[in-house]
Amino acid sequence: PEHELQAHFERTIARDQRIEPRDWMPADYRKSVLRQTAQHAHSEIIGMQPEGAWITRAPSLRRKAILLAKVQDEAGHGLYLYSAAETLGADRAELTDKLISGAQKYSSIFNYPTLTFADVGVIGWLVDGAAICNQVPLCRSSYGPYARAMIRICKEESFHQRQGYELLMTMMRGTPEQRRMVQDATDRWWWPSLMMFGPPDADSPNTERSMAWKIKRHTNDELRQRFVDMTVPQAGALGVALPDPELRWNAERGHHDFGEIDWDEFKRVVSGDGPCNAERVEHRRAAHEEGAWVREAAAAHAAKREEVAAA
Ligand code: ACO
C-alpha cells in the first residue's frame, strides 16, 4: 500500500541512505530530481561551446591538448547525467528536444561570450570553481545515480579548475598586456559566476523541498558565500582584483560581505535573453541535426543485429 511505500521512502531519506531507480518514490521527488539532472546535463553539453571555440586558436600544442581534454570531459559529464536522467524514466531524444525548444533550462553562465584566451583560464578558475563548490555536496544527494555521477564529475572538475588557475598564473607572469587580459576576463566573469548558484534563498522556489528530500544539501546563498570566501584569497595570490568595491572581510560574521548581484540581468539570461542564448541553442540544434545520420545508422545496425540474433 502507498502509505507504507511512502513511509519507507521517508525512512530511507532520514537515514541518509540512497533512493535507487527501482525504489518507490513520490512523483514530485522523481520530477524534481529529473528537473535538476536534466538541467545539469544540458549545462554540461552547452558548456562545451564557450571554450570549444578556442580549441583551434590555443596558443601552443600543450594548451590545445589540455583544452581538448577538458571539453571532452564536459561531453562525458553530460552523458553520465543524461544516463542518470534516463534511470528516472526520461527519454534521451525528448530531453534533447526540450533543450533545443527552450522547454528545459541550462546554466545561465554559458550564455556569455569568450573574448580572449584569458577567458579559458578564468572559466576554469571561477566557473569550474563555482561548479565544484556547488557539486561536491551533491555527491551526497539522496538520488543514488545522480550522487555517484557527481563523484566522478567532481574529480574531473578539480582538474579543470587547476588547469585554469595554472594558465592564469602563467599569464600573470607574462607581459602587461597578458595581465590586462586576465583582469578584463575576471571583471566580466565574476558576477555571472555568482549567479550560477541560483536566486537568493528567499526567491528560490525549489530549495526548501529539495533540501527536505536531501536532493540539495545546502541553500543557494550558503554555497555562494562559500565560493566567495574560497575565491578571495585565490584572487590575492594571483594578483587580480575582484570587481566589487563592497567586497570585504566581516570579522563578526566570519565571512566576506559582497555587493548586490544584478538579479534583473540573471532573470534576463535565464529567460533566454542573455548575450549568447540564441547562438548557443542554435549551435546545439545544428549539431543535433547534422548528427541525425549517425543515429539512423546506429539504429539500423542494431535492428540488423537483432534480426541476425533472432534467425
Ligand atoms: N541558470 C539557469 N537557471 C537557473 C540558475 C542558473 N544559474 N539558477 C537557478 N536556475 C533556475 C532553476 O533551475 C529553477 O528553474 P525551474 O524551477 O524552472 O526548474 C529556477 O531558476 C529557480 O531556482 P531554484 O529554485 O533555486 O532552483 P534549484 O533548487 O534547482 O537550484 C541550482 C538551482 C543551484 C542550479 C541547482 O539546480 C543545482 O545545484 N543544480 C546542479 C548543478 C548544475 O546544474 N550546474 C550546472 C552549471 S555548472 C557546470 O555545468 C560546469
Image (cartoon, helix red, strand yellow):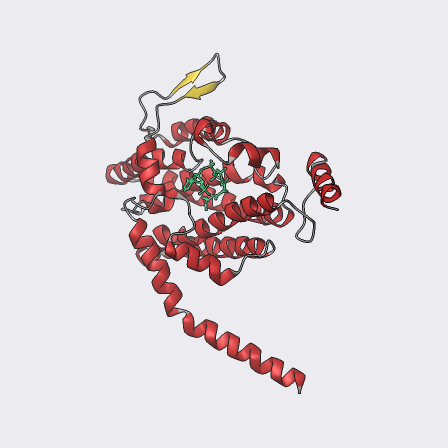
Furthest residue to the bottom?
Answer: 311
Q: Could you tell me residue 21's position as x and y percent? A: 66, 52
Which of 64 and 85 lies nearest the eye of the viewer? 85
Q: Quadrant of residue 174?
A: top left
* Residue 173 visible in the displayed image: no
Q: Quadrant of residue 96?
A: bottom left
Q: Could you tell me residue 126's position as x and y percent? A: 41, 38
Q: Could you tell me residue 64's position as x and y percent? A: 38, 56
* Residue 126 visible in the displayed image: yes
Furthest residue to the top?
Answer: 252
Which of 37 and 79 lies nearest the eye of the viewer? 37
Q: Is residue 36 left or right of residue 235?
A: right
Which of 201 and 58 lies nearest the eye of the viewer? 201
Q: Quadrant of residue 171?
A: top left
Q: Is residue 128 above or below residue 212?
A: below
User: Which quadrant, please, contains the C terminus?
Assistant: bottom right
Q: Is residue 289 above or below residue 235?
A: below
Q: Is residue 302 left or right of residue 256?
A: right
Q: Is residue 80 left or right of residue 197?
A: right
Q: Is residue 203 left or right of residue 28?
A: left
Furthest residue to the left?
Answer: 177
Q: Could you tell me residue 26's position as x and y percent? A: 63, 44
User: What residue is drawn where x is 52% and y is 30%?
Assistant: 219
Tag count: 0
